Amino acid sequence: MAISPEAASLKARSTPWTERILNITVSNASALPAWWRDAYHSYRMTLDQPDYPCFFGQAAERRGEMFYAFDGQHPQVARTTMRRFVELGRDASLVRHSLAMFCAPDPELTSHADFLRRFWSILRRLHDADEVPMRPADPDDPWWEFSFGGRKMFVVGTSPTYRKRRSRVIGSGMLLLFQPRELFTDLATGKPISAEVRRQIHARMLAYDAMPAHPDIGFYGDPGTREWKQYCLPDDNAPVTGRCPFASG
């Protein structure tokens, strides 16, 4: 008998976070590296703040709808984890789960430009290991979204190199958050989230970051919006220009 979404959600909420780490087995979860635990607790403390702007992320964490991976800076870890995440997403009870991929803190990561380079390098290597072509393939298409195994995902990059945009700082290392496109649709109607929800998020960003939402933030599929520009935002509100680093390899 298939488990209902309600029962699956209840089970997830009661499951320790360590049992949702995709790059270990449950049997060795008791011997996690110290930085793994530190990274998770910094992430959890950030999302637990009542005024944190992204209530999608807050809700997913509280409902136990998050998977985790660590050492995402290593290509093999990233590839293996992403394959497992996509496979798990074929289960209807897990289709709205997201993946938080933590990278080890690196004292040499001091510039925002270096963060951007590393972020796009991880996505490029994942794409190179993917056997399913992206549809569409051109990041300049308003319907382009990063995908793996045919599953479209919005990717949020956070880094300690942010100084002004503090909503994009979660701990002392880089974090890539992979959010399936299904998260941004209403469960009841199947339609994209409303403009009112987006307005509320923008208002929370203004209060939390003490700066307006970045001008490149928009709705998926709008002719004037490009998804890739929203993945790892600048630390100011200058519009992103030039080609997508993903396209240029």
Image (cartoon, helix red, strand yellow):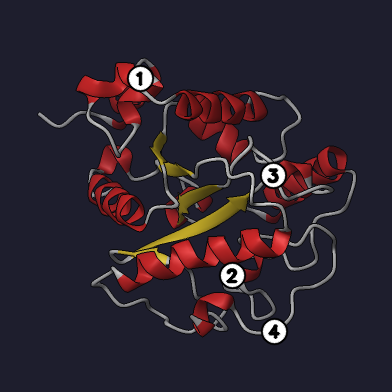
Nearer to us of marks 3 and 4 is: 3
- Name the amino acid type tagged 1: Leu
Q: Residue at x 51, y 76 (%)?
A: 246
Q: Are marks 3 and 4 in contact (CB under 8 Å)?
A: no
Q: Is residue 193 visible?
A: no
Which sits in the foreground, 130 or 90?
130
- Name the amino acid type tagged 3: Pro
Which mark is first along the chain, 4 or 3? 3
Q: Are marks 2 and 1 in contact (CB under 8 Å)?
A: no
Residue annotated with mark 2: 228
Marks 3 and 2, how far apart at CA: 20 Å
Nearer to us of marks 4 and 2 is: 4
Q: Residue at x 58, y 45 (%)?
A: 106
Query: What secondary structure is found at the residue carrying circle 4?
Result: loop
Residue 232: image x %, image y %? Answer: 64, 60
Which mark is first along the chain, 1 or 3? 1
Nearer to us of marks 3 and 2 is: 3
Which mark is first along the chain, 1 or 2? 1
- Name the mark on residue 160: 3
Marks 3 and 1, how far apart at CA: 34 Å
Residue 95 sits in which quadrant? top left
196 relative to 26 in the view: left or right? right
Q: Is residue 69 above or below residue 240?
A: above
- Name the mark on residue 10: 1
